[in-house]
Amino acid sequence: MTVGIVGLGAAGLRTAMLLERAGVTVRLFEARYRPGGRMFTADEGNGAVYEAGGEWIDADHLRCLDLMGEFGLEPNEPVDWPRKLVHKGKECTDVTLWNDALEDDLRVEAAAREFCSNLREPPWENLQAKELDRQVLGDFLREHTSSERGLWWVTAKYRSDEGDDPDRIGLLGWLSGYLHYMDREGEEMSAYRFPGGASRLFERMIGTLKAEPVYGAVLHRVRQDASGVTLIFENGEARVDRVILTLPPPALERVVFEPAISVEKRCAVEACRMSRAIKIVWEFDRPWWEEAGWGGSMLCDGPLQQTWDASGADAPVLSAYICGDRAVEWSRLGDPVRAGVYELSLLFPQAAKSFQRGWIHDWVNDPYAQGAFSHLAPEYVLEHMRYIAPAEGRVHFAGEHTAMWTGFIEGALESAERVVEEIIRTES
Ligand SMILES: Cc1cc2nc3c(=O)[nH]c(=O)nc-3n(C[C@H](O)[C@H](O)[C@H](O)COP(=O)(O)OP(=O)(O)OC[C@H]3O[C@@H](n4cnc5c(N)ncnc54)[C@H](O)[C@@H]3O)c2cc1C
């Protein structure tokens, strides 16, 4: 049996590793001229190295940690500086959180826990929760907070997790994700990073494979018949017994299927929303934030939303992660890098003098992703979610959007395990 894998991000490469390990021949195709998809370690020269896409691993992302372990890579633990919070010109840190914000945070957490205690898995089994599926996270946060600062804090926190504004996130979908958090102890979020960068992990993954990836292969059409599948790329064709498509939903939407895929699958792909997030990255001549006794991590009510020290090598680098409507606005600015330095210098005057050069990674307009990661929009869970992962004949689907760890690197790896099991079961 020969299985084609289209899309060589975390899902595609992990699938290839697992299938080859099971004795299956794979053929690998990727539209870009590099592996990794939405994970990519940018090396701008002179020591300026940082993650342009997926970066953080939570302590309970066991598949990620195990994968690193397979290659003898120890996860990086970031330096433990408290995160600065800036709201209306006042500052605190997440360990000295203002009382009103803390109270609201606890209220939101308690309400989420209560709702979660009535939820079943998988999320689409919660037919009793139609009303929750219609609501948005933003309304839930407004309902369970009593101060303006508290509302800002919980909004900023969950916008960062979801990669988009809470008014676009479905409440049932968010609660289904929250179920994962309930077992967590202490600070298990954003606990680790890939040592040497995520791209190093992808090099190692490719190094284990017998199959040679074909880059620049943009899939346009998938034609299946009783004996196999023909893949039609911009620049050629391939015939395989089965295919696994790991394309993010907006890219999948552009593929033509012959015969057409089911209406349910088509609607699920179209309804699966991508979070709107960009990264702006600045290199400085010195880590002025450390000199000021600060680690670089901040959540603020200004346009930059969130920053952290993203230095992956010698050069001091700060990164801003901007989500939602703001990300769209900033992706349209003539010079978002300079505009960002200006915003930063309003808070930290040293930034302007120390600035060397910078970059923007605009995932909203990325041709092969059109967003950072998927989130569960209102009415998605009960109407569509169950249809996103199942195979259509010889065509199989993987990628973070098909997983229970939706949106995460962990989800991409989870989907790889599921789809490999699906193929092996179907063939045996
Ligand atoms: C800015 C940003 C920050 C993030 N932060 C985190 C984080 O901190 N922690 C975390 O866990 N996750 C994070 N993520 C999400 C994480 O990166 C993704 O969930 C994960 O990388 C998705 O892997 P995937 O294999 O499912 O999809 P992808 O990596 O998107 O792989 C799909 C591949 O398909 C290819 N493709 C698309 N169209 C075609 C076509 N027509 N023909 C052929 N190939 C095609 C793409 O080029 C791509 O390589 C972040 C993502 C971004 C963008």
Image: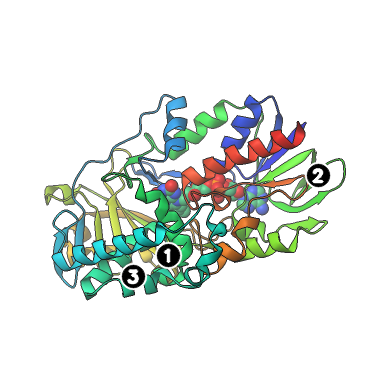
Residue, disc 3: 141
Which label's residue is closer to the chain start, 1 or 2? 1
x and y percent of residue 223 in the render? 82, 51
Q: Quadrant of the N terminus?
A: top right
Residue 266 showing in the rendered view? yes
Q: CA distance from mark 3 to mark 2?
A: 47 Å
- The residue to which callout 2 is attached is 229
What numbered label is drawn on residue 164? 1
Find out if the beta carbon at label 1 lies less than 8 Å from the nearest ligand 1 atom: no
Give x and y (percent) for residue 25. 72, 29
Residue 302 placement (x, y as % from top left): 27, 69
Instruction: Examine the rendered structure and indicate whether residue 49 appears above or below residue 335.
Output: above
User: Which amino acid type corresponds to the residue marked 3 in the rendered image?
Assistant: Leu
Q: Which callout, 1 or 3, points at the residue further toward the start of the chain? A: 3
Q: Position of residue 6 (x, y in %)?
A: 67, 44
The Cα–Cα distance between marks 1 and 2, rounded to whole angstroms, is 37 Å
Q: Foreground: 259 or 290?
A: 259
Kind of residue indicated by mark 2: Val
